[in-house]
Image (cartoon, rainbow, N blue to C red):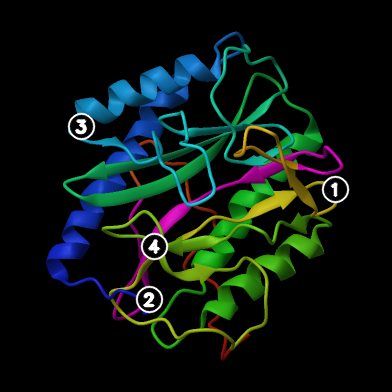
Amino acid sequence: MSIVIKDAAGIAAMREACRIASEVLDALTPHVQPGITTAELDRICAEEMAKRGSVSATLGYQPPGYPPYPGNMCTSLNHVVCHGIPNDKPLKKGDILNMDVTVIKDGWYGDNSRMFLVGECSIAAKRLCQLTFEAMWIGIEQVRPGGRFGDIGHAIQTFAEQHNLSVVREFCGHGVGQKFHEEPQVLHYGRRGTLEEMKPGMIFTIEPMLNLGRREVKELNDGWTIVTRDRSLSAQWEHSVLVTETGYEVLTLSAGSPATPDFVGQRPSPAQA
């Protein structure tokens, strides 16, 4: 299957869908407090999507071999790596939560996720969330025409392992557009100079999942929830990124997006590194 190159109209539509996905996370942010349930956050998520003329891509989503996903977004708590299902258990101080929001707007998919600290968290939890955020941006900084997708994975893996974090390998970023998941797969580990070449008009997610402990994961009986085998904390951040003629454009940015790290725009190119 070939990688879809978006034209100007497709890129404009993706900017809109991705901006909305980010704005939904903006709207959810003040609600993430001890005592609220992820089910209530999911309800608010659906309301915020509807306000913006969009719907959830995850609700009822059913890849082959999976049950229909029951939430408007994924809510992954503490040692849940990804695909956590919203439920009625209240959040408590010290929890870390990933909310992964994908909207459909006029047939186009906008996909992003963020980590949230619930009340005061441990130093280890805060460090994991911050380093995973930086790892995502280090991967994004590799995006340029002529680069290879292996450059992204190599940069993320190198950074993570330098900080004694492990990279989940079973799940990866992906192309996104008029389908939820398109080619290519965007691995968060690998070797520089390998895999497909990046070209202007490609849009894909970069969404590293890093663990405090070992990288091995397992699936729970609900058919969706993925957890760390050793029950160590896991964190994930996700942006949707466009390859431009000169570099990249992050499409899932909005007024409430966390500030980009200081190193963004200052890293050397692979030829200089």
Where 146 falls versus 129 (above or below)? below
Q: Left or right: 7 with respect to 24?
A: left
Q: Which residue is mark 4?
A: 241
Where 16 falls versus 45 (above or below)? below
The type of residue carrying mark 2 is Gly
- Structural distance between the alpha carbons of marks 1 and 2: 34 Å
Indicate which disc, 3 or 4, sits on the residue closer to the N terminus.
Answer: 3
- Structural distance between the alpha carbons of marks 3 and 4: 21 Å
Q: What's the residue at 46%, 20% (across, down)?
A: 41
Q: What's the residue at 28%, 74% (across, down)?
A: 201
Magenta segment range?
Answer: 228-252
Label 4 Cα neighbours within 10 Å, binned few <14 / some 14-19 / many ≥20:
many
Q: Is residue 32 visible?
A: no
Indicate which disc, 2 or 3, sits on the residue closer to the N terminus.
Answer: 3
Please identify, in this view, whether the residue under mark 1 or under mark 2 is nearer the observer.
1
Q: Which residue is mark 3?
A: 52
The type of residue carrying mark 3 is Arg
Please identify, in this view, whether the residue under mark 2 or under mark 3 is nearer the observer.
3
Q: Which residue is mark 2?
A: 247
- Structural distance between the alpha carbons of marks 2 and 4: 10 Å
Q: Left or right: 22 with respect to 226?
A: left
Q: Secondary structure at mark 1?
A: loop
How many numbered circles does the render carry?
A: 4
Q: Is residue 242 magenta?
A: yes
- Structural distance between the alpha carbons of marks 2 and 3: 29 Å
Q: Left or right: 269 with respect to 249?
A: right
Q: Is residue 231 magenta?
A: yes
Marks 4 and 2: in contact by CB < 8 Å?
no
Q: Secondary structure at mark 4?
A: strand
Indicate which disc, 1 or 2, sits on the residue closer to the N terminus.
Answer: 1
Indicate which disc, 3 or 1, sits on the residue closer to the N terminus.
Answer: 3
